[in-house]
Amino acid sequence: MTEEFQLVNEKKGHVIALAGNPNVGKSTVFNQLTGLKQHTGNWPGKTVGIAEGNAEYKGENFCLVDLPGTYSLSSNSEEEEVAQDFIQSDLSEATICVCDATSLERNLNLVLQVMQISEKVVVCVNLIDEAEKKGISINIPKLQSLLGVPVVATAARQNEGLDDLMKQLAKVVSEEVAMNPYMKDALESLKGNKEENTKALLDRATVIAKDVVELKDEDYNKRDRKLDKILTQKSTGLPIMILLLVLVFWFTIQGANVPSDALASLFATIGDYLNQGAAAIHMPEWLRAPLIDGVYNVLSTVISVMLPPMAIFFPIFTLLEDFGYLPRVAFNLDSFFAKAGACGKQALTMCMGFGCNAAGVTGTRIINSPREKLIAIVTNNFVPCNGRFPILISIITMFFVGSSVTFGSSLLSAFLLAAVVILGVLTTFWISQLLSKTILKGVPSSFTLELPPYRKPKVGSVIVRSIFDRTLFVLWRAMVVAAPAGLVIWMMANIMVGDQSILTWVTSTIDPFARLMGLDGTILMAFILGLPANEIVIPIMVMGYLSKSTLFEFDSLDQFKNLLLDNGWTWLTAANTILFTLYHWPCSTTLMTIYKETKSAKWTWISFLVPTVMGIVTCMLTTFIAHAFKLV
């Protein structure tokens, strides 16, 4: 057993590998049996690491190990290598091979490969309910007879058949059942020439599937094919993607305003009580000010600004994922990434970056090529994360739409925000191509992208999963880095050097350079101090303009706009701030994640410098052109 397979949750009992093709509900089986709420993605290669959990059955413990989804065990990818190595390791006692009842023939190929390297196998034919809806019936007893191993039909999302699955698994590990000797001998005889073995297994899978599967309607996938004609055609696929992007942003903008204001008001009230409590216990000012005016104010700002839009965006994103739409996004963008010398899977990691760039960086594990993985990591920051949306929305609304809250204005804001995001996506293509022709030269690799069947998402479980697995996880990570940032910001605003604070002194020092970018020292300083979390950029900016020693927020966008205008803002300042919001360094959480994924200070610095240089150059060019044509 290699060191990477040392399990964290292993108890005394049986260690069981859980294998299967992507999109067969394998992780759902794992979640139902172990009680863990593991996220179940709806695209190939989503789970690259090994997840584990414990299931109890009749007093015995089973440590289930959820392996990466893979179509074969030919070791042509990281997923296949991990799955094969674990199944063959001394640690694994038996293997549950999960199949999709709606695509049994394709799944049986992996089952036969697993049976060649594992003596104890239980076949779980999942999604039997979906198969029935499509008029597909499977003769389970006959399939069991042909394979010579236990076969159980399940509908994991409805928790059907899982008790029988555990019953058969317990029999297998206790050696009450064994593989059919005829099948064992047949599989053994196929070992040898890799190509011949692969072809023979495919042929055998086809024969078995035809013998046990009965179709009431040969055209059962008619609805899926009709949808794919619309969602994946060049003439309609991209416009629908853009329209959905606008709608998601519109829902996020419309829905986040009221709860965000309510949270800000709640935290302001709590802040008043904290100050009253501090006064009541005679807390010294040197302790009260940094804790309440610094740490608490920054944390409350991050939560009130970040939580509502994430609580809307992530569930919508997850619904699209569970419905099966995100693989269609990857399909539509694959040719663009191929032309850029990158991998089509980068489309998926880019989509994850909308919620959090750190999550997008982690998601690059699904990319097998180290070169293409680095391209995806370096360019992920060009997709604005949830923390940058408040800056973009506020400035777009104030300077290019109008602060009146109407259906038309919110829709226009969503269109302009979508335009900024599309600019970021186009930049991702361009920088990916630039990297692939310079420091990361290479030929783009191909990958198998299965378009899974469309499925009706379970809205309740999606909301719970997205809130706990994504929203609160990302929020907590932002709070961890924002808390010490609040202390640093307070110190800079309150420690004096001569007759001015450190914050004012630094702002004045960097102002000439910021002016070349069409910004000013206060704006640039806000971005610099916003390194821990983009959510605090605007509050720091306001604090700088008002020369306040604590973070400050306005009651309305009109008041905020007047402050900006009083400090020399024009449409060009607003445009450059939007551009620099899109093009600037990753937040500290993302940078730490990049270092963790690459284990390289060099690539962490490159990931920092590429978007930063892009932002500086773009803003300088925009400013030069605007002044050259006397547009300001």
Image (spheres, rainbow, N blue to C red):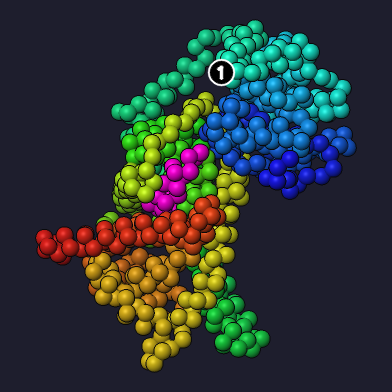
On the question of residue 98 being in view, the answer is yes
| Residue in view at x 45 percent, y 47 percent | 374
Residue 57 location, quadrant: top right
- Dominant secondary-structure state across the stretch colored magenta: helix
The vertical placement of 231 against 211, above or below, is: below
Q: Is residue 320 left or right of residue 581?
A: right
Q: Residue furthest front?
A: 192
- Estimate the x, y position of residue 37 in percent, counting from the top left: 66, 43
Q: Is residue 181 left or right of residue 445?
A: right
On the question of residue 32 being in view, the answer is no
Range shown magenta: 367-387
Q: Closest to the observer: 498 or 456?
A: 498
Residue occupied by mark 1: 195
| Residue in view at x 45 percent, y 66 percent | 531
Quadrant of the drawing holding the C terminus: bottom left
| Residue in view at x 32 percent, y 76 percent | 510
Residue 88 location, quadrant: top right
- Estimate the x, y position of residue 43 in percent, counting from the top left: 52, 33
Q: Closest to the observer: 46 or 59?
A: 46
Q: Residue furthest left?
A: 629
Q: Is residue 618 left or right of residue 80?
A: left
Q: Closest to the observer: 377 or 296?
A: 377
The vertical placement of 51 against 236, above or below, is: below
Q: Label 1 is placed on what type of residue?
A: Glu
Quadrant of the drawing holding the N terminus: top right
- Estimate the x, y position of residue 372 in percent, counting from the top left: 44, 42
Residue 343 location, quadrant: top left
